[in-house]
């Protein structure tokens, strides 16, 4: 008698502790091997892009916190950089430095959460306990500055909300003094750990050519050896005035992506130290910044029609007779990859169309490519290594 | 290479396709007809001087007032090798709401096109798996179109997934602790 063979299809998620939110993967298995993997996203879709279209630019700012809630500060910065470019607002140097410090603190906080959950998923629990202790310090630094810990809304279009004080600077110096020792602690736990090596080496391999073709960004791309980093390719804020290296991997696997992020910890510390040393004096919010109680104004209806209440450089606008809509795409390097804002402005205080190019959405789409042909246990490692947050993926 | 130079090359190569070129804050947008979009983007992808190996973003825009070309599909391209950008906008009319898929050039276009189909209703011909990605599969309408309301009282036509949850919550009220 011959036994009949049939593929088994199982649901991983949406309620699964290792899917980092509400990601659902439908896996078709042949024994332990994944034959087909279909991700389903959208469980956290809140229509953020539609909401943006109905709010003025300052009102849209708090919505960006809710995209990637692990690194909310950097989402704010990305939105502000994009809108500043659209409205051509010059940011004071001190604000640029403060944003860079905050951005890199966010990168450390994000990578801490990443290493904690990634190691926990693979089975190393202790890392979680150590790294959450260190994240708390960054949360305290946030709280010291703006009163909030998770959804900060601290940067503003044209600068930041309030200045940092000496207490913050002292504590931040102390943090970057201490933190490199703590990175060593994590590395002691997992870097040469045989179980960790077996679970990560040679798993989730994606070649450099494929990684670029799939549109991966951030450490997920750099693990495959492509040195693409928005901070180097199109510097914003104070990144053109600090020195840092961009780590790249060689073997294109989970382990190399892990190493990339561990080195990024140290690069972030380097950037924060340089910014604190060079912190210039002056304003933290540009006088051109749009007020919070800004009225949306009327969209342009005729060529050369005066723009809304806030747009500077109206003479320039009047010269334009061809187009009514200004398009702009501005990207920043958030901890997870490239966060881009594609804004179509119609001259009023509201965006006509706002598209958020989120790294998590692209990284979730590459999961079938990484998982197919691997074992079920490696699916967990693959979800961890691309570093997705579903709030940002579903928008 | 400067974005304007790339736009000039495109203008020379595909003069019948390019409608106009717009420059705004150092960024260049080339507006093209949709018919030969795959050819244009393959040219940008393959030509060694341009080498746009990276499709950063694909996004739809709905210009409700323009009757003859209501939708635009914006392709944001980047070359990692040369570090230059360009944006190609393809015009899609309302009554012929489809465009050729570029998943053959960039595999990463897959979900971007699905999202654009989901939220704008633009069909991508040649896409291997064109399903909704963010909205539920039985949702009606395309939310990011400008004639789709931000909120409204749908009454009877409310999405079934929502009414089911409300009904279940109503049924389970007896278990609440007071």
Image: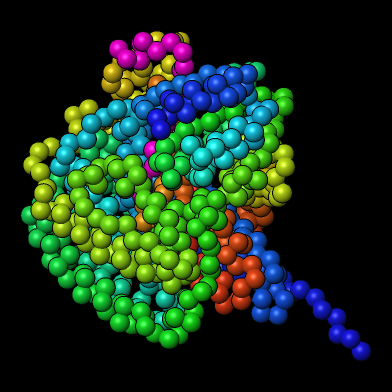
Image location (x, y in percent) of residue B123: 69, 37
State whether residue A318 is above or below residue A91.
above
Residue A109 pos. (x, y %): 30, 62
Does A252 appear in magenta?
no
Residue at the image position 60 percent from the left and 61 percent from the top:
A369
Depth check: give the residue in front, B117 or A205: A205
Q: Where is residue B42 in the image (x, y as percent from the top left)?
A: 60, 38
Q: Would residue B63 be seen by someone viewing this image from the given angle?
A: no
Q: Does residue A366 lie above or below B21 as drawn?
A: below
Does A8 sit left or right of A275 as displayed? right
Query: Residue at the location (26% across, 67% down)?
Result: A136
Span colored in magenta: A315-333
- Residue B42 in view of the camera: yes
Can you name the residue that lies furthest to the bottom here? A1
Residue furthest to the front:
B48
Q: Nearer the viewer, residue A29 or A215?
A: A215
Tell whether B44 sits left or right of B5.
right
Q: Where is residue B117 in the image (x, y as percent from the top left)?
A: 64, 40
In front here: B172 or A134? A134
**Quadrant in the rendering for residue A298:** top left
Depicted B118 relative to depicted A327: above or below: below
Q: Which residue corresponds to the image point at 46% horizontal and 68% vertical from the top-left?
A: A251
């Amino acid at each position: 008698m011959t036994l009949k063979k049939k593929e088994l299809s199982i649901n991983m998620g949406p309620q699964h502790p290792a899917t980092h939110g509400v990601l659902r993967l439908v896996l078709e298995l042949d024994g332990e091997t994944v034959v087909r993997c279909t991700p389903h996203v959208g469980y956290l879709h809140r229509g953020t892009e539609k909401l943006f279209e109905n709010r003025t630019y300052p009102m849209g700012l708090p919505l960006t916190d809710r995209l990637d809630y692990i690194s909310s500060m950097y989402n704010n910065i990305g939105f502000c950089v994009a809108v500043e470019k659209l409205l051509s607002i010059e940011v004071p140097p001190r604000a640029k430095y403060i944003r860079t410090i905050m951005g890199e603190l966010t990168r450390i906080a994000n990578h801490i959460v990443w290493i904690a959950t990634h190691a926990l998923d693979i089975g190393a629990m202790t890392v979680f306990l150590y790294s959450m202790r260190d994240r708390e310090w960054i949360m305290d630094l946030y709280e010291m500055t703006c009163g909030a810990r998770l959804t900060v809304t601290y940067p503003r279009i044209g600068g930041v909300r309030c200045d940092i004080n000496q207490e913050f600077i002292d504590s931040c110096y102390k943090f970057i003094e201490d933190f490199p020792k703590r990175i060593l602690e994590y590395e002691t736990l997992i870097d040469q750990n045989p179980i960790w090596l077996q679970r990560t080496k040679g798993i989730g391999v994606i070649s450099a050519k494929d990684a670029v073709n799939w549109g991966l960004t951030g450490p997920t791309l750099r693990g495959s050896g492509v040195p693409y980093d928005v901070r180097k390719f199109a510097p914003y804020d104070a990144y053109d005035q600090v020195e840092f290296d961009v780590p790249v991997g060689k073997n294109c696997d989970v382990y190399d992506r892990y190493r990339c992020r561990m080195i990024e910890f140290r690069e972030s510390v380097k950037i924060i130290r340089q910014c604190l040393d060079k912190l210039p004096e002056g304003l933290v919010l540009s006088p051109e910044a749009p007020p919070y109680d800004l009225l949306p104004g009327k969209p342009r209806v005729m060529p050369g029609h005066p723009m809304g209440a806030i747009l500077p450089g109206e003479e320039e606008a009047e010269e334009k007779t061809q187009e009514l809509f200004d398009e702009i795409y501005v990207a920043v390097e958030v901890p997870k990859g490239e966060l881009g804002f594609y804004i179509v402005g119609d001259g009023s205080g509201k965006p006509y169309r706002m598209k958020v190019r989120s790294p998590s959405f692209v990284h979730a789409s590459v999961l079938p490519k990484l998982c197919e042909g691997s074992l079920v246990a490696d699916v967990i490692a693959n979800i961890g290594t691309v570093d997705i947050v579903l709030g940002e993926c579903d928008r | 290479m400067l974005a304007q130079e790339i736009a000039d090359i495109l203008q020379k190569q595909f003069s019948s396709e390019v409608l106009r070129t717009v420059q705004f804050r150092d960024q260049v947008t080339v507006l093209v007809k949709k018919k030969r979009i795959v050819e244009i983007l393959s040219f940008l992808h393959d030509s060694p001087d341009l080498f746009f190996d990276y499709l950063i973003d694909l996004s739809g825009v709905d210009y409700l007032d323009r009757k003859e070309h209501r939708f635009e599909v914006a392709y944001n391209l980047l070359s990692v090798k040369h570090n230059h950008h360009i944006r190609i906008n393809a015009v899609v009319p309302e009554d012929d709401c489809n465009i050729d898929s570029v998943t053959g050039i960039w595999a990463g276009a897959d979900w971007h096109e699905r999202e654009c189909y989901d939220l704008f209703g633009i069909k991508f011909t040649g896409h291997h798996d064109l399903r909704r990605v963010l909205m539920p599969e039985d949702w009606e309408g395309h939310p990011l179109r400008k004639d789709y309301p931000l909120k409204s009282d749908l009454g009877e036509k409310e999405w079934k997934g929502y009414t089911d949850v409300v009904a279940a919550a109503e049924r389970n009220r007896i278990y609440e602790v007071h």
